[in-house]
Image (cartoon, rainbow, N blue to C red):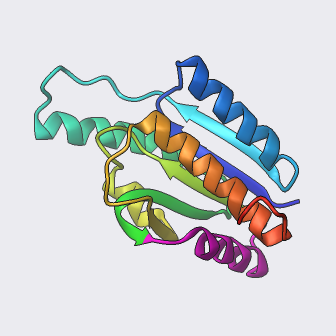
Amino acid sequence: MFELTLITVGKLKEPFYLAAAEEYRKRLGGYCQFRLVELPEHRLPESPSPAEIAAGLEREGQQILAKLPKGVWFCVLTPEGKLLSSEALAEKLSQVKLSGKSSACFLIGSSYGIAPQVKAKADFRLSMSPMTFPHHLARIMVLEQLYRAESIQAGSKYHK
């Protein structure tokens, strides 16, 4: 069975986000082996300097790369990434599966972004939108889109 991993920097706290994430985790289980990896966001001062932000991203980047599954197709979610429709994301995942990869990993970085060395490791850079979303909401949106992509591939009626 295909393995799908979502690495996130930061934890969900609000009950409504936790409930939504759990619902999509359960739904994804019908299509793939799903794993969520939550990493702590590096604490920064109230008004961090660019150097402090870079150092924090570097530390987060080391944690991310340590948790990245070996041999995985790796996608980072970043504003400068490519915009895809739900159907195009489903097709992208289908191509990954057909290429012989048995797993894919998506990354949502911290509120300050993703370290350059992590972006350099990515096989694909995906943008959710030119708009800005809270990271907690972005996680739910990514989970829903992964579920939608899997259901599109399976020919289910979920995607209309």
Depth check: 10 or 87 in front? 87
In the image, residue 144 above or below residue 49: below
**Relative to residue 49, is residue 55 drawn left or right?**
right
Percent position (x, y) of residue 29?
84, 46
State the image quarter where residue 18 is shown.
Answer: top right
**Relative to residue 46, is residue 17 drawn left or right?**
right
In the image, residue 58 above or below residue 46: below
Residue 100 inside the magenta-drawn segment: yes
Which quadrant holds the N terminus? bottom right
Depth check: 38 or 55 in front? 38
Residue 21 inside the magenta-drawn segment: no
In the image, residue 20 above or below residue 29: above
Q: Main secondary structure of the magenta part?
A: helix
Residue located 32% across and 54% down the image: 131
Residue located 66% across and 62% down the image: 72
Percent position (x, y) of residue 80?
32, 65
Depth check: 147 or 105 in front? 147
User: How many numbered marks are there?
Assistant: 0
Percent position (x, y) of residue 10?
47, 30
**Relative to residue 63, is residue 150 drawn left or right?**
right
State the image quarter where residue 73 is shown.
Answer: bottom right
In the image, residue 36 above or below residue 106: above
Residue located 81% across and 39% down the image: 26
Residue range (magenta): 83-101
